Image (cartoon, rainbow, N blue to C red):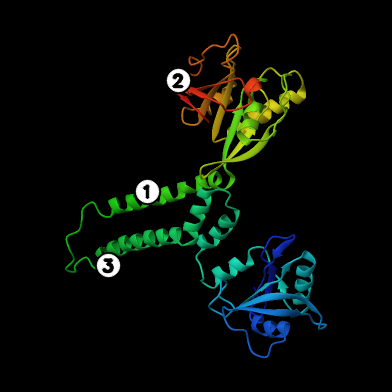
Amino acid sequence: MPANDTIVALSSPAGESAIALIRLSGPACAELALAITQRVKPLKKRFAHFANYIDLQGVQIDECVFTFFAEGQSFTGEAMLEIAPHGNPLIVQKILTDLMARGCRPAEPGEFTRTAFMNGRMDLSQAEAVSDLIRARSDRSLEVAQRQLHGSVGRKMSELTERLLSVMAHLEAYIDFPEEDLPGEDQAGPASELRQLIEEIRDLIETQRYSALLHEGIKTLIIGEPNVGKSSLINALTGADRSIVSDIPGPTRDYISAFMMVGPWRIEILDTAGLHEAGDAIEQLGIDHTIEQAETADFFLLVLDVTAPCPTLPDALLQRMTPANTLVIENKIDLPGAAERSDFLPALQHVRILCWSAKASLSCVKYGNSQSMPV
C-alpha cells in the first residue's frame, strides 16, 4: 500500500444485518473522522462515539458508532477508523461511496492483514492464521487457528532458529579459533543436535497434511453395490433427505456431498454411485467418479447387503482401504436370508445394522463381540 493511501472495506458479511462494520486504515483516518462527524474535538482513542454520518453534500446518511485507533495501537499498525452503521446494504454502499469520494481506496483482498504483517504487528504464520480462523468450520480447526494466531508456530520456528544458530556458532568457534583454550571437542560433533533439529522440522512440515482435514472436513466415502442402503445411510446420518432412496437399483449416478459434526470434527460424507457392472455410459461415469473420489478420501464406509453375495471391489479401491480408515457396515441383518459376513475382508472392522429401508434409523449397531450400542 502506498504511504499516503487510506484504504476502506466492508469487514462484515454482505447482506442485511442489525449492524455492519466498515474499516479504514491509513494516515487520513483522524481527519476523516472529524469531517464525517462534523466534530471540533478529535475522537478519543479506543473509545466508541455515537454520532451522525454526514456525507460530502451535508446529508445525514445514518447514525453510527465510530471508534478511532491511533498509529501503533491498531490491528494494522496504522491509524484506523471503524464505522458501525445499521446493516442495510443501501446505507453501507452510500457510506463506502462517500468515503471513496473523500479519497479512500478500496482495500484489496487480505490487505488489512498484509499491512499488519508489513508493519511487524504479526509474523507470517499469524497472518495466515487470520484466514484459517475466519474459515474454521469445526471446534478443532478453530482451536488450531487460534493457537497459530497467538504465535505458537512463530515461537517454535524462533526456537529452532536459535538452536541452529547455536550449532553454527559452536562449529565456527572451533574452526576460527582452533588454538584457543576451548573445551574439549566432541568427536561426534553436532551431528546428534542436527539430527534432532531435522526431525523436529520434519514433524512441523508433516502437520501441513492435516490442514485439509481441519478446514475442509474428514472426507468419508460411502461405497458399495447398488441398492445396499448407501443413500439411506447418508440420509439417516445427516437427518435430511439428502440423497434419493429407491428400490430401483442405481438411482445415484454421481456422488452427493453433505456435512455433519462429530464432536469437534467436521465430516464431509459422500454418497457415491453403486459399484457394479455398468449398464450404460452414464453409469460408468458415476462409477469412475467414485474411484476418483476414493483417491483423496480419508475414511470409507463400505456397505454390504448381507442378503446378497459379497461384492467384487475394484483393485484401485482395495488398495486405499485399510483397518485404520475403513468400516464395513453389514446392512439388512433383520431380513430373511441374512448371513454374517465377517469372513469378507476380515482384517477390517465390521458393524452390523438393521435394514435401512425397513427401519430408516440408526436404532442399534451390533459389533462382532455381540455388544449392542445405540447410535
Q: Secondary structure at mark 2?
A: loop
State the CA–CA distance, disc 1 to disc 2.
40 Å
Please determine whether, in this image, residue 255 is positioned above or below residue 312.
below
Q: Nearer the viewer, residue 71 or 318?
A: 71
Q: Residues within 10 Å of mark 2 (few under 14, many from 20)?
A: few
- The answer to whether residue 157 of the structure is visible from this angle is yes
> Of the residues tagged 3 and 2, which is closer to the observer?
2
> Looking at the figure, which quarter contains the N terminus?
bottom right
Nearer-N-terminus badge (3/2) = 3
- Residue 199: give its label: 1
Please determine whether, in this image, residue 160 is positioned above or below residue 306.
below
- Residue 39: give its label: none
Q: Secondary structure at mark 1?
A: helix
Q: Residue at x 66, y 21 (%)?
A: 357
Q: Nearer the viewer, residue 353 or 276?
A: 353
Type of residue at label 1? Glu
> Of the residues tagged 1 and 3, which is closer to the observer?
1
Type of residue at label 2? Gly
Q: Position of residue 21 (x, y in %)?
A: 67, 68
> Mark 3 = which residue?
176
Nearer-N-terminus badge (1/2) = 1
Q: Residues within 10 Å of mark 3 (few under 14, many from 20)?
A: few
Name, please, the residue furthest toward the top.
337
Question: Are circles 1 and 3 on residues that touch, CB within 8 Å?
Answer: no
State the CA–CA distance, disc 3 to disc 2.
69 Å
State the CA–CA distance, disc 1 to disc 3.
29 Å
Please determine whether, in this image, residue 32 is positioned above or below residue 344.
below
Type of residue at label 3? Asp
Q: Position of residue 175 (x, y in %)?
A: 27, 64
Is 354 on the left or on the right of 279, as rendered?
left
Looking at the image, how many numbered discs can be counted on the residues? 3
- Residue 368: give its label: 2
